[in-house]
Amino acid sequence: MFDKSVYIARRKVLASKISSGVVLMLGNSEAGCNYTDNTYVFRQDSTFLYYFGLDKPDLAAVIDIDSGEEIIFGDDVDIDDIIWMGPQPFLKDEAAEVGVGKTAPLAKLEDYIKEAAAKGRKVHFIPQYRYHNMIQLNRMLGIPFEDMKKAPSLELILAVVSQRLIKEPCEIEEIEKACDLGYAMHYTAMKMMKPGMVEQELVGVMEGVCLSGGYMTSFATILSQHGETLHNHKHDGILTPGKLCVIDAGAEIASHYASDFTRTLPVGGKFTQKQKDVYTIVATANQYALENARPGITYKDVHLGASKIILQGLANLGLVHGDIEEMTAAGVQGLFMPHGLGHNMGLDVHDMENLGENYVGYGPGQERAKQLGLGSLRMARMLEPGQVITDEPGIYFIPALIEKWKKEGTNAQYVDFARLESYYDFGGIRLEDDILITEKGARLLGRKRLPIGVEQVEEEMKDN
């Protein structure tokens, strides 16, 4: 939790962006894993955390835009709770720590919201992803479940996005800590990877490092020798010399700020020449993005620039041929990189994705493309100082996708499908860093950069 002045200032800015009515913010409740009392690890809603800072279940808050009144709704523990949990602070004292002077029992929330709605006042809320909160909204406002996606307040969504996109110095400090922990996770895997290990062993080691220094992983760990499957969560493979292993993992620390790194490692510690050739293309595209991301340029343009680096590299290998600009416009790069260059990151590893990716990653006048690859770009906005984004180009050889394009004749004038057949067992390569947009450019987050060059990686793994 930050100093209460941070939360007071955030709410003041938010209130200035909303015309009138009541802002309703629902915290999260605990969710049963396999029965009610055996719960998943509790995770507070990020927007509630951003404005109200309290990291405990069964809370809600309102901001009356017209009167300026702020209330946190929740319950103090009773003796039954104390037996199992020990003495707990009073809600009024916790609310005071984030600058809120008024509290009320959670049971009073429904009456408060119903009364506001009955008076014709607008009740603003953001999109919900937990069914418990959807049920609350249905009960309080009578919103049919089939209308939950279109009922949230666009005015509030845009206000929240405009604030959370630009990270405060205190947030950047926390993200740096998450990046340092993410570094430790990945570096440990790099040093411990040995042929014959089951992939899950390495996953367990990485997640143990994370849990020993943080709150949880920032997303489900991706570790696989089948890197052509972009989000591969199967970890049952035996690490085999000559294979490439994609490791995409991050840490979430106690403040809930996140990191997200990817490295692709050669099992056995040495790249083949074929692997080096493709790896170098991806590393060059990663460095291009780092050097070219800056205020005044859109991340869509950086994505397209990295795409050209990838196409030129593949052309040098004889896998594609033709004018680079023409191939980029035609979307040839989507065959090899069917995802976007990166996404916003902060309290969520895909920051504010629950608010709507197009509101978060696309600014005024920008429309999402339909082209494979470019259409999956989560962050296309004009870059501004204080934004935190990922830089994660990749090259993947996906046999089913290649065969589909071949059968349909998609971009056949540019792609050498015959030569691509020898890459069907290659897998994929992704290299990801977290970067901060500065006043003049961009910089890496975290005290150390994970080894990324071919020689660096091989040197670190020489004793594996």
Image (cartoon, rainbow, N blue to C red):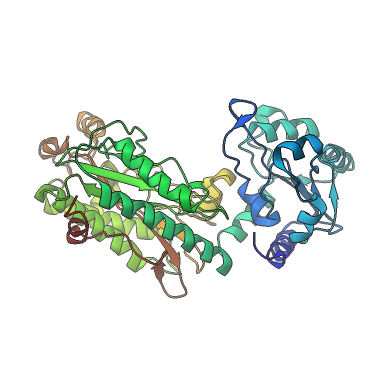
Q: Examine the rendered structure and indicate whether residue 292 appears above or below residue 362.
A: below
Residue 243, x across and y down, in percent:
18, 41
Q: Examine the rendered structure and indicate whether residue 100 appears above or below residue 62.
A: below
The answer to which of 172 and 3 lies nearer the viewer is 3
Q: On the picture, is 135 further left or further right than 255?
A: right
Residue at the far top in the pictured view: 35
Residue 117, x across and y down, in percent:
84, 40
Q: Residue at x 22, y 58 (%)?
A: 460
Give the quadrant of the N terminus: bottom right
Q: Residue at x 29, y 37 (%)?
A: 199
Residue at the far bottom in the pictured view: 440
Residue 444, x across and y down, in percent:
39, 65
Residue 360, x across and y down, in percent:
54, 52
Q: On the picture, is 255 further left or further right than 153?
A: left
Q: Examine the rendered structure and indicate whether residue 221 appears above or below residue 144.
A: below
Quarter occupied by residue 283: bottom left
Task: Count all numbered tags in the image, as a single digit.
Answer: 0
The answer to which of 202 and 260 lies nearer the viewer is 202
Q: Residue at x 31, y 59 (%)?
A: 450
Q: Examine the rendered structure and indicate whether residue 36 appears above or below residue 48.
A: above
Q: Residue at x 75, y 60 (%)?
A: 97
Q: On the picture, is 294 further left or further right than 104?
A: left
Residue 322 visible: no
Residue 420 visible: yes
Q: On the picture, is 31 further left or further right than 412?
A: right
The answer to which of 211 and 250 lies nearer the viewer is 211
Quarter occupied by residue 203: top left
